[in-house]
Image (spheres, helix red, strand yellow):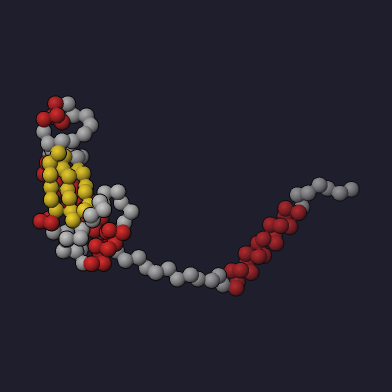
Amino acid sequence: MKLNPDEVEFSAIRAQGPGGQNVNKVSCAVHARFDVKASSLPDHVKERLLAMRDSRITEDGVLVLKAQQSRSLEANKEDALRRLQELIDKAAVVQAVRRPTRPTRSSQRRRLDEKTRSGQIKALRGKVKD
């Protein structure tokens, strides 16, 4: 699934943390808002994205990412788009259905034989009788 950058709304905000005067006067961090329900993604990917237990997804189905690693606004936008694409790729993968299997008879026998052997060894650890 390829993310359409036109569906992402960016807003510049001030970054947190250390940085001196630059942090106080330059808005270089980015909030990227992606409306999952109104996007052009396939329905099954939308459902999986909304089903994710992620605090960045609002009740309205809007995914909000904050990018503030770089001091450049453009670099932060690219970082937000990359992280959003990773989330979409993760939601697009369909997990294989796990079918429960049963242990083979020989593996059951080996396990029981090993239990018997270890029980015999432990029995020898007791007090010596005169």
Where does residue 40 sit, x and y in percent of width and height? 16, 64
Q: Residue at x 56, y 72 (%)?
A: 104
- Return the residue nearer the eye: 107 or 18: 18
Percent position of residue 20, x then y: 17, 26
- Which residue extends farthest bottom? 105
46 lies above or below 69? below
Q: Is residue 8 visible?
A: yes
Front-most of 52 and 73? 52
Between residue 44 and residue 89, name the one nearer to us. Answer: 44
Q: Among all residues in the image, which is located at the extreme front?
A: 60
Position of residue 80 measured from the top left corner of the image (x, y, whole percent): 18, 48
Residue at left offset 65%, top offset 62%: 114
Which quarter of the rendering shows the N terminus?
bottom left
User: Given the current orientation, which residue lies at the most extreme top position?
Assistant: 21
Residue 75 visible somewhere in the drawing: no
Reply above or below: 81 against 68.
Answer: below
Question: Which picture quadrant has residue 75?
Answer: top left
Residue at 20% x, 60% y: name it.
Answer: 37
Please state the total of marks drawn on the protein image: 0
Measuring from the top left, give residue 27's x and y in whole percent. Answer: 12, 36
**Residue 53 falls left or right of residue 72:** right
At 18% from the left and 29% from the top, the residue drawn is 19
**Is 124 left, or right, of 70 in this rendering?**
right
